[in-house]
Amino acid sequence: MGYVAVKGGTSAIQESLKRIYYERIKHNTVLDIDKIEGGMRGLIDQIMSESSLYSETLAAIAIKQAEGNPEEAVFLLRAFRSTLPRKHYSRAVISENMRVERRISASFKDIPGGQILGASMDYSHRLLDFDLLEETEAGIKAWLNSFEQKEKADNPVEDTDLSRLPKVLNYLRREGLIADCSIDTREPDDVTRMSLTFPASRSQKLQILTRGQTGAVISMAYAVIRGYGSVHPTVGELRVGQQPIYIDNPLQQSEDEDEAYYIGDIKLTEVEMLTPVTVEKDRGKKELVFEFGYGLCYGQNESKAIAMSILDKSIEKGDGILPTQNEEFVLYHIDSVESSGFISHLKLPHYVTFQSKLNDVRKTKQVKAMGKEEV
């Protein structure tokens, strides 16, 4: 059930909205949209992922309007998304064609193309950088110029085609250690147009997981690893990069790839998480094999994509006894708009229902008091 704002006293609401505007500008500071877009990359990526709308500019506007509140920004962006017409469907993306910016594997040290660390906080000391207080536009322009010149000098020609890096899991498939994935040609369910149903289809599960509130998805995946589930994973491959998107000719449908139109790139984080499982073979013999969970998010959203892959495997293979294995529990409770909307609605008037409960409590006390007097 989703909750939205309700009407109240018109003048009081107008004054409240003025107060919101005042609180945002009272320090005489105006945040430029391009600066939010350029300097809050992590928050932008989170908002786009949870909103199911890839637009850094619109995400920046939502962040500014919501004063940095992620849940409110997602609400705003989803509401706007619901007004947009859908003119085209893209072709299914092939993530092997992603132009990789970052690519790591926790399962193998040496992989073709190498481990590409890229941009990540993982290797920083997590110390507060007070130099940011003195950061200036002139200073960053000089640093960028020096960095880009050094990049050109150190890497005049790329030795590796970063748009054709093979998948790590393919090595295990060739050895028969992980099953091949059959191509599912069924039309995917769209949770933005039809309500979630149970048992949920795989397309519904993956959509809800990638739209889920980042903190909620990570918390539930953490619970799985701590023992509220049977998934003990290792990152087979994590890749971040630019994924090309193609659409078919709207006037002439064709299976030929050369007939498709390239419309641009979107930045994605993809995770394939390996999990060892014991399967029973002929005559009661047991064998250890690998299965995998899958995670895909807009932007560079690594922790969420990893957590998504863990929950994907947990709700797929779990028996439903534990909450983290119950698809209804997981999918219903990770959505930020649904959950924050329900919690926020408690601030709205509940006068009638509360007065009813209050009357019941008073009557109970009166009856109890009368009983004591009779004794």
Image (cartoon, rainbow, N blue to C red):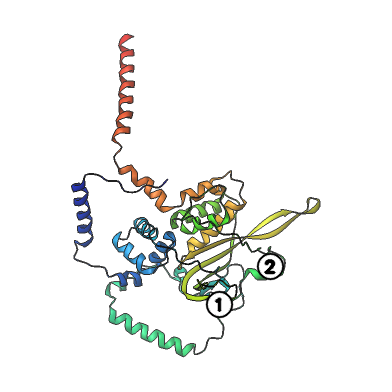
What mark, if any, has residue 311 been given in the picture? none
* Residue 311, x across and y down, in percent: 54, 55
How many labels sit on residues? 2
Where is residue 329? Give x, y as percent.
51, 46
- Which kind of residue does numbered mark 2 sit on? Arg
Residue at 78% across / 50% down in the picture? 284
Q: Where does the N terminus fall, quadrant-wise?
A: top left
Report helix, strand or loop for mark 2: helix
Disc 1: CA contacts within 10 A as few (<14), some (14-19) or many (>=20): some
Q: Which dot marks residue 259?
A: 1
User: Against 375, is 227 above or below?
Assistant: below
Reply above or below: 140 against 80: below
Name the residue at 60% across, 59% down: 186
Q: Secondary structure at mark 1?
A: helix
Q: Residue at x 24, y 44 (%)?
A: 8
Q: Quadrant of residue 351?
A: top left
- Left or right? Give the position of 123 relative to 370: right
Mark 1 / mark 2, whichever is N-terminal:
2
Residue type at numbered disc 1: Glu
Does residue 38 sit above or below 356 in this rendering? Answer: below
Q: Nearer the viewer, residue 144 or 91?
A: 91
Q: Position of residue 57 (x, y in %)?
A: 35, 69
Looking at this view, name the residue that lies furthest to the top: 375
Q: CA distance from mark 1 to mark 2?
A: 31 Å
Residue matched to label 2: 173
